[in-house]
Amino acid sequence: MTVKVKVKTPDTVTPESRGDWSWHEHDLAGYDAFYTLTQHGSLSAPEFQSTWRKNGDHIHELSFPVEVDNADTDGDAERVLALDAGIRKDVTAVVVEETGKQVSRPHFVRVTDRDGMRRRHRERQRLNDQLAELRRSGRDHTAAFKTVQAEYERVNTKIQHKREQLTHDVANQVVALALVYD
C-alpha cells in the first residue's frame, strides 16, 4: 500500500515570496502497522520535523500522527494503566479498574538530568545565535563558521542521545509499574 503525499516546498534555498514555493506529489510506501492504526483511528495533519541521526547527519522527517479511537477489548482486562504525558511536565501514571476507580496512587515518572538538558539547550541556542550572526555578516564560508557549526552538531547529537535515553528510562518505569499491578 502507498500513501499519496502533496508537499509544498521552496524552489530556492532562501525563498522570499509565495511564488518561490511549489507543490510536489510523492507516493510513499507505508508500513503495515501504519495501515492497521488508520483502520482504528483518524489520520491527523502531517508534521515536518528536523532531526539529527546518530552519525551527525541532519535530516528532515515527515510524520503522520494517527489519533486512535478507543479500542474494544476482549473483556479480560480488569485494570488499565492510564498515562498522562505532559508537554512540559513529567508523565503521570495510575492504574484504574474497568469501572474507572483508581487502584494505585499516581506515579510520577520523573525525567532525570533535567538540568543537563536545559544546559545543552542553552548551549545549542548560543551556538545557533553565533551561526546566525556569522551568516548575517557574510562569513558563512569561513573556518570559524565551520568550527561553530561542528560544535552545534555535536551538542545537537548529545541532546538527541539524551532524549533517547530519557524515553527509554520513562518506558522502563511505566512497564515496571504495569507489572507491579498486573
Image (cartoon, grey):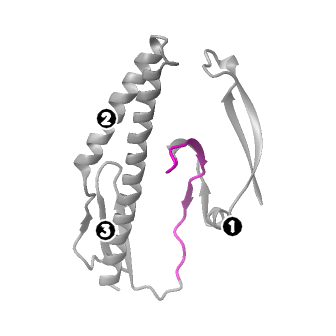
> Which residue is outermost to the front?
143
Proximity of marks 1 and 2: CB atoms separated by less than 8 Å? no
Q: Is residue 34 left or right of residue 55?
A: right
Residue 75 visible (yes or no): yes
**Mark 2, mark 3: which one is toward the viewer?**
2
**Residue 96 seen in this snapshot:** no
> 167 and 76: which one is in front?
167
| Kind of residue sitting beneath label 1 | Asp
Q: Nearer the viewer, residue 176 or 125?
A: 125
Identify the magenta region: 53-73
Q: Provide the residue designation for mark 1.
A: 32
Residue type, mark 2 in image: Glu
The residue at the point 56 percent across, 53 percent down is 65
- Which residue does the image show at 35% across and 78% down from the upper left? 178
Please give the residue where the numbered disc 3 appears in the rendered image: 93
Q: In the figure, 29 relative to 117: above or below?
A: below
Label 2: which secondary element: helix
Q: Which residue is mark 2?
A: 123
Q: Name which quarter of the figure residue 33 lies in.
A: bottom right
